[in-house]
Image (tube, rainbow, N blue to C red):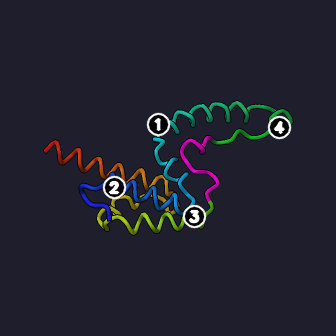
Amino acid sequence: MLGDDNFDAWERAVGDALYGAGAYELVEASKHRPAVYNEAMKVYARTYQAWEELDEGDQGDEPEEPEKLYRAVGVPATKRQKAWGAITRSIRPALRAKVDKVKRGEVEDLIRAVGDQYFKATVGSRSN
């Protein structure tokens, strides 16, 4: 269970559990921050806009969204479900309520949100 002072141990335990379940790519993807994804999305938006402006016969394939920078694309839903359950069972209800905005199944976002809450709490408590 994640407490106030064991985030590193919790993060390792989650990584070990997901590795054992064959879904470690969820942990790897969770390490990429939104800024990287947001920058890639800006490039994608410009590319997509240019693609839309082409005549239909000249368009070719639709540009792909750069989701691989932020998501573990290709992880089966069953692995995501198991990972989600393992992670949500390992955090306190109060913390679960704070990360409740994360869409069910978006494991990478859940891991990021838990880390963000932990670091927000520890930085805030150190500055008081």
> In front of the other: label 4 or label 3?
3
Q: Label 1 is placed on what type of residue?
A: Ala
Judging by the rendered image, the residue that carries numbered circle 2 is: 9
Judging by the rendered image, the residue that carries numbered circle 1 is: 35
Mark 4 nearby-residue class (10 Å; few <14, some 14–19, many ≥20): few
Query: How far is disc 1 from disc 3 in space, using C-alphas?
Result: 26 Å
Query: How far is disc 4 from disc 3 in space, using C-alphas?
Result: 39 Å
Q: Against 128, is 18 above or below?
A: below
Whether the magenta-drawn stretch holds residue 8 is answered as no
Q: Which mark is residue 79?
A: 3
Mark 2 nearby-residue class (10 Å; few <14, some 14–19, many ≥20): few
Judging by the rendered image, the residue that carries numbered circle 4 is: 56
Where does residue 69 sit, x and y in percent of width and height? 56, 41
Taken as a whole, is the magenta stretch helix, strand or loop? loop
Where does residue 49 sit, x and y in percent of width and height? 67, 33
Where does residue 67 sit, x and y in percent of width and height? 60, 45
Whether the magenta-drawn stretch holds residue 74 is answered as yes
Decide which of tag 4 and tag 3 comes sooner along the chain.
4
